[in-house]
Amino acid sequence: MKESYNIIIADDHVMFLDGLHNILTEIPQINTIHVATDGLQVLRILSHFDDIDLVISDINMPKMNGLELLSKVKETRPEIKFFLLSMLDDIRTINNAIRKQADGYLLKFADKEELKAGIAEVLLGQQYFSPAVKAKYMEGVFNNKANQEIKLSKREKEILKLLADELTSNEVAEKLFISINTVETHRKNILLKTGSKTTIGAVKFAIENGYFD
């Protein structure tokens, strides 16, 4: 665990941005807080600083929205954690955030203690999707009217199959020539997508739904 973290916060509503800044100053581990009002400003900050650990962003912003920014950051600086803070709770937006590898997603009406706890989880290398976001995601997945199908990517299926064969995350990383962090990210996404608490549960889900056929 690092002793201090440098972050960027982005939101086009200045009053909300100021409030968020004040809350984050209460977290002792946070060192520097850069402020932006759109996605392009975030990219400019990232071009000047190579020590950013976390981006906290709204989704609805001018010039470049939060989901577009998420894609850019994960493509160019995958080591940076990305936390979405939004009023949007529709299944399509949440699913896109998961697909684009968001590390956290919290709705803006959450209290500040949940915000601080969620950020702490993400800084420690975990994912944090609030109970409200998880509930909305699973509601969409299992709602027949929504006609949603849980889709695992080719790489996710490949990793899950190897985990089902009782390979460790280290062994999977070596076999696929990828980092263990990449394996763990995929594993967490698989658990979230399938609504499973453990890898065994995800494997059971995959077998029951013919993912290994």
Image: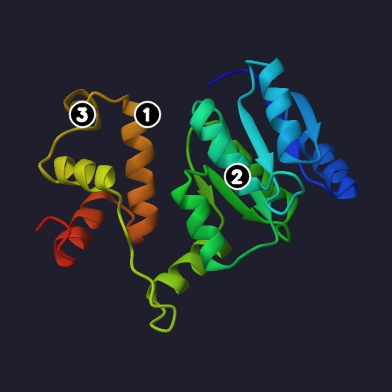
Q: Residue at x 60, y 48 (%)?
A: 67
Residue at the spot of label 3 = 176
Position of 67 with respect to 164 (left or right) is: right
Which is more foreground, mark 3 or mark 2? 2
Relative horizontal placement of residue 87, taking residue 207 as reference (left or right)? right
Look at the image and tell me whether residue 131 can be seen.
no
**What amino acid type should be assigned to the residue bearing mark 3?**
Leu
CA distance for labels 3 and 1: 13 Å
Q: Label for residue 4? A: none
Q: Position of residue 166 (x, y in %)?
A: 12, 39
Please state if 157 lies on the left or on the right of 21 as rendered. Answer: left
| Residue projecting furthest to the right | 15
Label 1 crowd (10 A; few <14 / some 14-19 / many >=20) = some
Q: Which label lies toward us, 3 or 1?
A: 3
Res. 3 image quadrant: top right
CA separation in Å, label 3 and label 2: 28 Å
Q: What's the CA distance linking mark 1 and mark 2? A: 23 Å
Residue to which mark 2 is pinned? 68
Please give the residue where the numbered disc 1 appears in the rendered image. 181
The residue under the point 53% across, 47% down is 128
Between residues 17 and 200, which one lies in front from this camera angle? 17
* Residue 119 locus on image (x, y percent): 62, 40
> Dot 2 lies on which element?
helix
Q: Nearest to the eye among marks 1 and 2: give it.
A: 2
Residue 65 place in picture, x, y as percent: 68, 48
| 10 Å crowding of disc 3: few (<14), some (14-19), many (20+) | few
- Disc 1 element: helix
